Image (cartoon, rainbow, N blue to C red):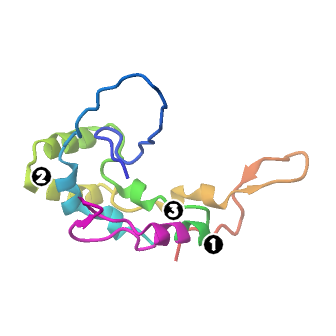
């Protein structure tokens, strides 16, 4: 997963093929590794248990947290309540609107204030950001109407089945 210092996990990587000579830059360390080692909300809220809790491990020469891709994919594909999950993205403190709280979080994390990381992770929960908001998952249960005059319209069925149990 790629996490952008400003966009968090809502960053979509893309590939551009070119023969233009480019000079590679160096990785940017903006304090996220230290913050993630304290926070762990993505692992806590993963219904598939696909995100590990605890310390990073060495995999293919890199020290990181290894997501269980098979568990994540299996959960998303077999989820009877919808076609996805996204809890890890929803609860990540780096995935917040540009507010005073988000700017303060980025400021503290970039300056490597260790106590700040713990306080931010706790405040994220206190402010209601630390848990997925299941009422906002209505799109998992949308049904398409296949009769005129509302053909193609999407509606929430009366027997919507969210949240996950």
How far, Cα to Cα, is label 2 from label 3?
A: 29 Å
Inter-mark Cα distance, 2 to 1: 39 Å
Dot label at residue 116:
2
Asked if residue 163 shows in the view, the reply is: no
Q: Which residues are magenta?
A: 48-74
Q: Residue furthest top?
A: 20
Residue occupied by mark 1: 80
Q: Is residue 24 above or below residue 118?
A: above
Across and down, in percent, residue 38 comes to 19, 62
- Mark 3–mark 1 CB contact (< 8 Å): no
Residue 52: quarter of image: bottom left
Q: Is residue 132 above or below residue 152?
A: below
Q: Position of residue 76 (x, y in %)?
A: 55, 66
Find residue 66 and report its image quarter: bottom left
Q: Relative to 41, is 157 on the left or the right? A: right
Q: Please indicate whether residue 73 sits to the left or right of residue 43 in the image.
A: right
Task: Compare marks 2 and 3 and give the one earlier in the sequence.
Answer: 3
How far apart marks 3 and 1 lie (CA) works out to 11 Å
């Amino acid at each position: 997963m790629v996490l952008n210092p400003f966009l968090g996990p809502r960053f979509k990587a893309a590939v551009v093929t070119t023969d233009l000579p480019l000079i590679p830059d160096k990785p940017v360390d903006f304090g996220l590794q230290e913050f993630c080692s304290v926070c762990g909300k993505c692992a806590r809220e993963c219904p598939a248990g696909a995100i590990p809790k605890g310390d990073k491990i060495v995999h293919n020469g890199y020290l990181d947290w290894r997501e269980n891709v098979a568990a994540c994919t299996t959960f998303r594909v077999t989820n009877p309540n919808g076609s996805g999950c996204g809890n890890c993205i929803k609860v990540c403190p780096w995935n917040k609107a540009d507010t005073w709280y988000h700017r303060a979080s980025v400021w503290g994390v970039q300056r490597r204030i260790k106590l700040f990381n713990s306080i931010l992770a706790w405040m994220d929960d206190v402010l209601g950001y630390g848990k997925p908001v299941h009422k906002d998952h209505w799109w998992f249960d949308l049904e398409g109407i296949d009769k005129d005059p509302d053909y193609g319209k999407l509606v929430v069925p009366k027997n919507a089945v969210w949240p996950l149990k």
